[in-house]
């Protein structure tokens, strides 16, 4: 697979820009398809699988958290034994009952005894690093590997994104999840490659918050 992102881990688990949506949309090719997902209030986690087996996990702060991650039932220890390459992906670990990003980060940074298989944490996978496929295809692949993926809406109409954002503010969209916004992304891998990333965020994705 061709590399679309820097190798350095700290560059991979990027944040999201909160620029004006209209300005962001104007930079996209005409007729671009966007996917819109809930912005989960949780802890970003990177996972590395080698020959289909989970071998490494890290947080945005570059903390090694593999031992605690192995104890979270929502994260598969094996995805595909036939894989002959390393696969790296990103997702978000969250509590289904509360907005508890800080407490999750504290759990992950502590010893293995702090998280056991009964801990109620869930995980959404949403990005395969170095993928040549579009967003929707990657989400399908992640599901085939056994991951839960975020609810994903699709549109080529910027006005629809604004309507979804308004619905989210009114608690009419993604209301069953702990969210702090919605995320709009380019679906096309070609557009993503053209737009690239800044030091802090991908230029092909945008957070819409309150």
Image (cartoon, rainbow, N blue to C red):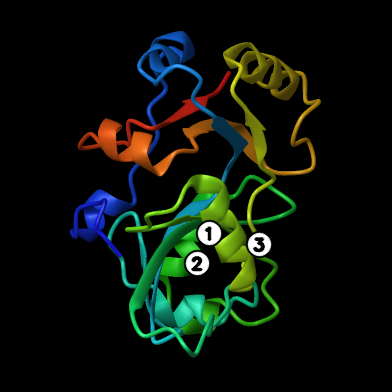
Q: Which residue is located at x 26 percent, y 60 percent? A: 2
Q: Nearer the viewer, residue 32 or 90?
A: 32
Mark 2: give few (<14), some (14-19) or many (20+) Cα within 10 Å: some
Marks 3/1 in contact by CB < 8 Å: the verdict is no
108 over 20 or under it: above or below: below
Instruction: Please tell me whether mark 1 sits on a helix, a strand or a loop.
Output: helix
x, y percentage for residue 92? 52, 55
Observer able to see residue 14: yes
Q: Can residue 93 be seen in this view?
A: no
For mark 3, what is the residue?
148
Crowding around mark 3 (Cα neighbors within 10 Å: few <14, some 14 to 19, many 20+) is: some
Q: Which residue is drawn at 23% across and 54% down?
A: 10
Residue at (72%, 54%) from the top-left corner? 96
Label 2 secondary element: helix
To which quarter of the image does residue 123 belong?
Answer: bottom right
Residues at marks 1 and 2 touching, judged by CB atoms closer than 8 Å: yes
- Tell me, for residue 104, which label it has, or none: 1
Instruction: Say which mark, if any, is on residue 107.
Output: 2
Q: Position of residue 192 (x, y in %)?
A: 35, 38
Q: Are marks 3 and 2 in contact (CB under 8 Å)?
A: no
Task: Tell how many labels.
Answer: 3
Indicate which disc, 3 or 2, sits on the residue closer to the N terminus.
2
Real-space Cα distance between discs 3 and 1?
Answer: 19 Å
Residue 149's x, y, as percent?
63, 56
Where on the picture, by quarter, is residue 173?
Answer: top right
Between 157 and 174, which is closer to the camera in this rendering? 157
47 relative to 169, above or below: below
Q: Which residue is drawn at 70% across and 79% down?
A: 118
On residue 154, the disc is none
Label 1 neighbourhood size at 10 Å, few (<14), some (14-19), many (20+)? some
């Amino acid at each position: 697979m061709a590399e679309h992102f820097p190798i350095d881990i700290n560059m991979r688990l990027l944040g999201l820009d909160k620029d004006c949506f209209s300005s962001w949309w104007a930079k996209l090719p005409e007729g671009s398809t966007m996917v819109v997902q809930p912005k989960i209030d949780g802890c970003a986690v990177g996972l590395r699988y080698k020959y289909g087996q989970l071998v490494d996990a890290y947080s945005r702060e570059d903390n090694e958290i593999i031992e605690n991650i192995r104890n979270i039932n929502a994260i598969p220890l094996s995805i595909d034994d036939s894989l002959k390459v390393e696969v790296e992906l990103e997702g978000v670990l969250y509590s289904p009952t509360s907005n508890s990003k800080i407490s999750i980060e504290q759990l992950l940074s502590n010893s293995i005894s702090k998280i056991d298989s009964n801990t109620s944490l869930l995980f959404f996978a949403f990005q395969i690093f170095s993928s040549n496929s579009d967003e929707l295809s990657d989400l399908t692949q992640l599901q085939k590997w056994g991951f839960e993926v975020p609810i994903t809406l699709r549109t080529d109409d910027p006005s629809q994104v604004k309507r979804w954002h308004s619905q989210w503010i009114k608690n009419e969209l993604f209301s069953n999840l702990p969210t702090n916004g919605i995320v709009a992304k380019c679906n096309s891998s070609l557009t993503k490659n053209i737009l690239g990333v800044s030091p802090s965020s991908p230029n092909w994705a945008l957070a819409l918050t309150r």
